[in-house]
Amino acid sequence: MVGEELLDGSGNRVVKLREPVRPPTDRAPERQSAGFSCQQPAASDIADYNLILFGDPGSNSVIARVIGQLPIRWSKTEITVGTQKFAAADHIPAVIYPNPANPKRYVVINSGHTFGDADFRGTNAWLYPRLGDYSVLTATGDVALSGFFDEQWWLQ
């Protein structure tokens, strides 16, 4: 196991990662990370770890709290990146961004694999990150949009 497995107050499995996560650029601050499901991370977790979040704003309360402070908007019906809009029913975002509660750390939102079933069957070489700082994926895993923030973390 790469981390400490815990249960939150609702019985959801939470894993605090012990091994570093390598963000897609060398702009990375300290690289220790923690994953949370539906619990509020403690102040010490926000200070000490990058937060790796899975789910959506309706299933993960931490995502619900931070999404309004990120350059990507995500509601029940729509995902918005800059001027581009995508239906939330059949698209998912993936993003890494400085944590609004601690800009020395990152928040990562990921709702699943960044490769499709056919890719996985052929080789495991697809298991490395292939996307930018932000992406919007279709329900089938195709990339609808992907890009990098500039050095000030603005959409380009």
Image (tube, grey):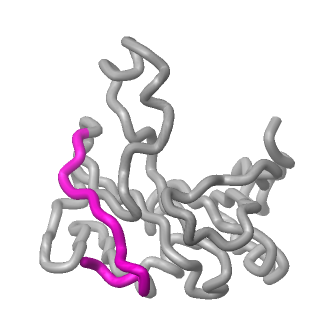
Quarter that holds the N terminus = top right
- In-front residue for pair 143/64: 143
Q: Quadrant of residue 133?
A: bottom left
Chief secondary structure of the magenta portion: loop
Query: Is 49 left or right of 73, judged from the image as shown?
Result: right
Residue 43: x %, y % from top left: 79, 83
User: Residue 149: within the magenta?
Assistant: yes
Quarter of the picture holding the C terminus = bottom left
Q: Is residue 7 above or below residue 98?
A: above
Residue 97 at x, y = what percent? 49, 73
Q: Nearer the viewer, residue 116 or 11?
A: 116
Q: From the top left corner, tell me how far across and down residue 142 is, in percent.
A: 23, 40
Residue 28 is inside the magenta segment: no
Nearest the camera: 84 or 24?
Answer: 24
Quadrant in the rendering for residue 106: bottom right
Task: Name which residue lies at 82% across and 46% down.
Answer: 3
Position of residue 146 relative to residue 64, above or below, is above
In the rendered structure, which segment of residues is drawn in magenta?
142-156
Q: Is residue 89 above or below residue 38?
A: above
**Residue 52 in the figure: left or right of residue 115:** right
Residue at 71%, 63% (x, y): give it.
Answer: 31
Q: What's the residue at 27%, 49% (across, down)?
A: 137
149 over 152 or under it: above or below:
above
134 left or right of 139 in image: right
